[in-house]
Amino acid sequence: MAEPINDDSPITVMEAIRRTASTNNRSPGTIIRHEEQLSTDELLEFIRLFGQERKLHHDSKEGPVTMREWKRFWRRMFHSWNTAYKVNVDVPIRPRILPDLKVLVGVLSRNQAPTNKNSAQPPPSERRQGANVFLSVTIVADDMVDFRWKDARGKLVDRPNVRITVGSCGMAMAMAIEYYDSSLTRAYYSHNNERVIKRVRRLIAHFARESTRIHGMPPPGFDVPILEEPELAAPRAQQLGMHWKEVLKTMEAQRSI
């Protein structure tokens, strides 16, 4: 008697496909609701997309392929979807248009002077002494990062007016970088996931229309999506830190001459 298949045992993708029930006689226009309605030739066309989805799912730390992983992939692709549903086109990500990624780092030590120096009006509550101050970071040209001190409404305040309450200026900057990078990483992760899922579903819908007679031939020009990588602030900040360390070292050496 053969031993039962262990879904957690390492296998190849080809072995996972071989273990998947399939069909070789599906009519055009059949509504596909699960992977077992695909042919072996069609399943082969999903190997690279499966690899991309695994990379995203495991944050690039994926282990060996298992039957459990293969089944998880297909459950996700068919979750609340079948080929009777429309597959929407990809929407480009716009990483610069994110919510204001700022962290609370201090308070105003004095009233923030109005932008209009001729204004006799008292500052609004968010720009008065004791009001919360936030810090945000953005990446700019020439491998630089830019820190901006803001009030609760996102308007800039002067750094000398800020009393930091999170330990130090360095700690505040580290918090801003961490929040910016984690938020951007999540945004790109969600976008890349959506693109892979839509590409998989588009291919399934194509096979549903054409039937098994095309032997798994994808539509003209079809390819896996190119996953987009966020441009994070931490590597730039680290590089800038090394530059400043070198500057200080050089200045110290010049003083000793």
Image (cartoon, rainbow, N blue to C red):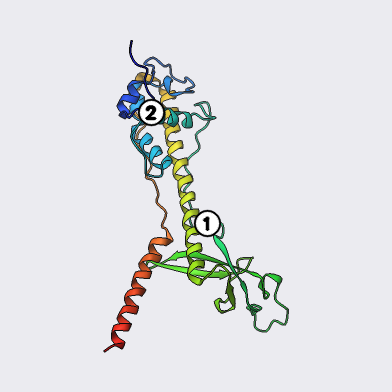
Task: Sort mark 1 into few (<14), some (14-19) or many (20+) by Cα contacts within 10 Å.
Answer: few
Type of amino acid under label 1: Ile
Specify whether 163 is left or right of 189. Answer: right
Marks 1 and 2 sit apart, C-alpha to C-alpha, by 41 Å
Residue at image x 35%, y 19%? 213
Q: Is residue 245 above or below residue 71?
A: below
Task: Sort mark 2 into few (<14), some (14-19) or many (20+) by Cα contacts within 10 Å.
Answer: few
Residue at image x 70%, y 76%? 123
Specify whether 153 is left or right of 69. Answer: right
Type of amino acid under label 2: Asp
Q: Residue furthest left?
A: 257
Residue at image x 46%, y 23%? 34
Percent across and percent down for residue 147 are: 49, 69
The residue under label 2 is 8
Q: Is residue 24 above or below residue 219?
A: above
Give the quarter of the image for residue 66. top left
Give the quarter of the image for residue 15. top left
Give whichever of 207, 135 is nearer the camera. 135
Give whichever of 195, 70 is nearer the camera. 70
Question: Element type at marker 2?
Answer: loop
Give whichever of 168, 128 is nearer the camera. 168
The residue under label 1 is 97
